Image (spheres, rainbow, N blue to C red):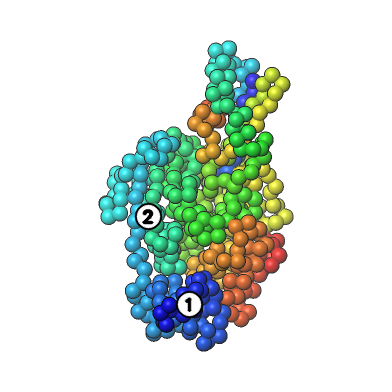
Amino acid sequence: MPHRCGLHCLIPPHVLERIALNGDDEQRQWALQTLSMDHTLRAARLANAAAQVTPPQYVNVIAQAGTGEKRRTIYDCQGSEQLRQAKVVRGEGDGPTGDDAVNEAFDGLGDTYDFYYDAYERDSIDNKGMALNGYVHYGQGYDNAFWDGQEMVFGDGDGKIFVRFTVSIDVIGHELTHGVTEKEVGLQYFGQSGALNESVSDVFGSMVKQYAKKQTADQADWLIGEGLLAPGIHGRALRDMVNPGTAYDDPVLGKDPQPADMSGFVHTTQDNGGVHLNSGIPNRAFALYAKALGGHSWEKAGLVWYQTIRDPRLRATAQFRTFARATLRNARSLFPGNGDEITALQDAWKQVGVDV
Amino acid sequence: MKIAVERSGGFAGMTVRSEVDTAKLPPEEAREWESLVAAADLRSIAQGRGHRGGRRHPGMPDAFQYDLTVEHDGGRTRVTAGESELPPPAKELVQRVIQHAR
């Protein structure tokens, strides 16, 4: 073994990151030097987060690392549910087509990629520049959008209840984030861990919208699926993160069933155990936290959530309480002391009835 | 024959319930539904998933969950599955039931 290849060769990056964040000055310096060898932007980001300043020796790392190049492809399913028969209609570098769904999907994937790269130096879904494939015009009047493990799929809606699912940028951010969650903690899509998976997608989906509009937490509408309900339906959106349960109230759709805190937790076998219902609880905790801190959501509250889903100690079967405690642990690492970043987080979880 | 479909989940998380009662339909139409049900082969889907009604596998993010119940001659078959887990004939059946009820 070459002399220069010491202990660092054996230590996984996430452990080095912990040391960089939590160690004393000497340990931090060593961990940062080790991390900087792989020339990742994430190391530089951690260096900044740990030291709260930009150390001159890492400026070069920021300048060199990462490509930030998106690789988007939009496919047209032409009303079929067979993805393999879809045809390519727009690739990276191609100009807009005459099809709104194609252009919205293309732009939404771009905004989502840019958000993750600029806010967290994350290079696509897998942090390794994974290609982003979006499929539009899936099925006949298909009232849905989903992530199938490899690509994002968008229906046109039936026109009576929903319009096309590409119309809301946060829907696109939501779907892509399912890919991020799957690559990181892999929260099981059932019960509380599934509701957390859903909530993480809403949290980052909403932040993609806020980022694209350059909004602060106070300016944001915190709505999911704004513009998705067809004309004539009584509702503002599908979900309201600040006030879960108030997004719509319509004779056809009924009333938004999301609980706003643990007292309304829904026990059901539908919807993989209510993953789209109980997600309202952690959604509200995040929105309250981000609003309490003020400024851009992604800079502090979003960073805490991002570090949490990347926390090696968070399990795929995490429940609300274990997730909440993990957010607190990561907030303490990112923001030493007992400042607003900690007390506001404790307060947010308390308001939704989750003990931390 | 009664064919009931409950579709839950999806990005919107809204539940839609639909039912077809073939006893209330003209004989020709009723026979068509019965052949659709036969083609869907629900028993083998239920057995293949190793459960009766309850869910065992975590789902695919934002995919619809279908809960399909067929009552016929005093018997009852129930299948709960994500949309990607249903073979094409069963998917055809649930989509036809939802369209019929609209």
Q: Chain of mark 1?
A: A
| Residue A323 placement: quadrant | bottom right
| Rendering coords of residue A63 (x, y %) | 34, 75
Q: Residue at x 69, y 67 (%)?
A: A356
Q: Chain of mark 2?
A: A
Of tags 1 and 2, which is closer to the observer? 1
Residue A131: which numbered mark, if any?
2
Q: Residue at x 48, y 49 (%)?
A: A149
| Residue B38 placement: quadrant | top right
Residue A8: which numbered mark, if any?
1
Count residues near mark 2 (Cα–Cα under 10 Å), then give few for <14, some for 14-19, many for 20+.
Answer: some
| Rendering coords of residue A330 (x, y %) | 58, 71
Q: Is residue A63 visible?
A: yes
| Residue B1 placement: quadrant | top right
Asked if badge 1 and badge 2 are on a common chain, one would say: yes
Amino acid under disc 2: Ala
